[in-house]
Every structure is written in C-alpha cells, then in structure tokens.
Amino acid sequence: MSSQTHDPQEGVAAWVPQWDLSNFIDFYPLPTWLYNASRDLGCEVDVASTRFVVRGLVLGAVEFTTAVLTKIGMKPQGLGASTSTESFIAADTWQDVARIATQDRWRVSNLNEDDKEDIRISKWTNEHFADFAAWLVEDKDMTQSFHCTTSIVWCDACNDDLSSPSTPTAAPVVAYTCGICDRGDFDVCHECYVDKGTRCPKAYDCFLRANIGLWYEHNDEDLRELRSAATRGSADRFYKSLRATTNCRTWFASTTGYVGSTSHTTQRGDVVCVLFGARVPFMLRPEPDSRYRLIGDCYVDGMMDGKAVDMWEAGELKLEEFTLC
C-alpha cells in the first residue's frame, strides 16, 4: 500500500510502500494480470537521476467523486450524504452498472477467495448480470427506492454497525475514516468522533466519507428484467466480487466523461493517467512545485485494454512526463 494522500512521514515519497502499517489492511489493488491499460509499452526511468520521472497519457482530471452509482434516468435521493458532491454516476443499463461496480471482473467460483479465479466479463455478460440481479433483489422490497450499500462499515470505537452489505438505506451511510493508521482503515461514527472526540490510534486526521453503493429506483420494466435474470444467478458470488472492487473505494467521473472507481482518498482535480509500463491506470495529484503525488490505482471503464494507446497513436492524446514526489 502506498502512502497515498496522507503521508505521516515528511520527506517520504508517495510511491514508497508504507511499512509502518503493522496490521492487515483490508484493501484490494486491481489485479494487474487482468488488464493491460498501457499495452505493454515499457517504463523508462533514469535510475541515476535524483528525480523519479515517468511517462504516460492523461485521460482527464477528476470532476467529482460520489458514493452513488445508478442507471440513467433515475434520481437518487439524499445525495448530501455523499459529502464531496451532490452528483452521481448514471450508466446506460443495469448491465453497465454491474460491470462498473465489479471493475469488469467476474468471480467464477463461489468458494475460492483468490482473485486469480476472476475473469473479464466480456464473454460472460449474461451470467455476470444474473449474479448482479440476484444480489440486488435478494431479501429486498423492490417496490421501494433505496441505496444499496456494498460493504461492511462499523465504528471502531463503539463497535456499532453503521452499514451492512446489500442493506437498503435511504441515503449513503457516512463515517469518519483514516486511511493510514495502524488499523489500515479506521472508521468511527459521528457521535464518537464529534461528540466524544475519538481519534484513530496514531492520532492522524480523519476525513468524512460515504459508504459507496448502488441506487435503485422502482419501475415495473426494470423490476421484471432484474427478477427474471436473478433466477439464474448467485447473489453470494456477486458479493464476493464486490468485496474486492468496492472496499476503500469511491466512484469518480472525469472532466472528459470517463467513469470508474478509485481510492477513497481521491479528490477533485486529481489526474487520471495511463502510465507507460503500468497495466492499470493511476491517480496522480498535482503539487504546487509541478510534481505529482501518487494516490493509487484506479479502474476507468472502457480504458483497461490499451484504448489510451490507440488514442495516442491516432493523435488524440499526447505523451507527457510526470515527476513523482
């Protein structure tokens, strides 16, 4: 795990692993073997230089992050709880929602937790959608509109469950969180943080984030589609994919129209890049001295298999250099 945005050691580069995290971190980087965003273009680094300079292609800047992913035409409620914006991401179809939510990955096995079991969903679209539909409709009143959370969040101070996976809520559940403490991902409820003054074990600053999920808005046509597909799917299999693709993540939209998922520490203005030599895209944060801070990897829908390289070769993108700090 890189130091991301909250570097507790002044002078330590953002791309250096944070070795002082003593406990297991429930964080899942994208499986690099599954994608090839830079299409095997090599990384050229001057090892004799005091600067770490990499080359790559800019796909745009982050316009907003949000806790809400839904289908186009739906109007989510309670968006103020997304903390960073009142915007949301709307995909064209429920199949697109399912693909984005699981980073274009499908877990074939119900039992094996190893992500080596994951495959791309392009040849298994119907099966993947059936799993998604089974998860979405399971034990829910589908005649109501709701926000459906994708992961477990509890208060590390009072142990109160703030959010359970697939539990319908009126709006995204929020918590104060620290991404760098020795718990790896420290969450605390509003009462403990604000009223009781509880802080993470190493007293790092916490920030308010919403637990991401999907917004479902009832209409008869969608309900028929989802229920029909759900009869062929496995809710458990889909949730196991979600555990790996949504924990400690947020949805984002770029100024150039791309959408995807990224580290929950991502902010507006961070730059979405395909770096040469990297099989997945990355988020970089511009610094005042013209250098960039590495935030982490990201999933950019439609750009995971070399399309950025095609655009560069067609003259639609230009090659740039980034000095990392």
Image (tube, rainbow, N blue to C red):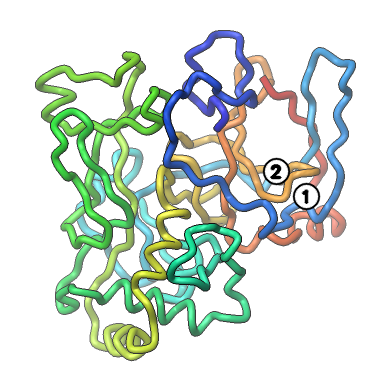
Which of disc 1 and disc 2 is earlier in sequence? 2
43 or 244, which lies in front?
244
Position of the N terminus by quadrant: top right
Q: Residue at x 22, y 54 (%)?
A: 164
Q: Residues within 10 Å of mark 2 (few under 14, many from 20)?
A: many
- Residue 71 disc label: none
Residue 323 is situated, as x and y percent measured from the top left of the image, at 74, 24
Question: Which residue position is annotated with label 2?
Answer: 58
124 or 301, which lies in front?
124
40 relative position to 268: left or right: right
Vertical order, 240 against 288 (above or below): below
Vertical order, 214 against 276 (above or below): below
Residue reaching furthest to the top: 10
Residue 188 is situated, as x and y percent measured from the top left of the image, at 22, 31
Q: Residue at x 74, y 42 (%)?
A: 275
Find out whether the residues at labels 2 and 1 contact each other: C-beta distance under 8 Å: yes
- Which quadrant of the figure has residue 235? bottom left
Q: Residues within 10 Å of mark 1 (few under 14, many from 20)?
A: some
Residue type indicated by callout 2: Val
Residue 183 is situated, as x and y percent measured from the top left of the image, at 36, 28
Residue reaching furthest to the front: 111
187 or 114, which lies in front?
114
Position of the C terminus by quadrant: top right
Q: Residue at x 44, y 44 (%)?
A: 64
Q: Secondary structure at mark 1?
A: loop
The CA distance from mark 2 to mark 1 is 7 Å
Residue 267 is situated, as x and y percent measured from the top left of the image, at 47, 35
Vertical order, 42 against 290 (above or below): below
- Which quadrant of the figure has residue 139? bottom left
- Residue 317 disc label: 1
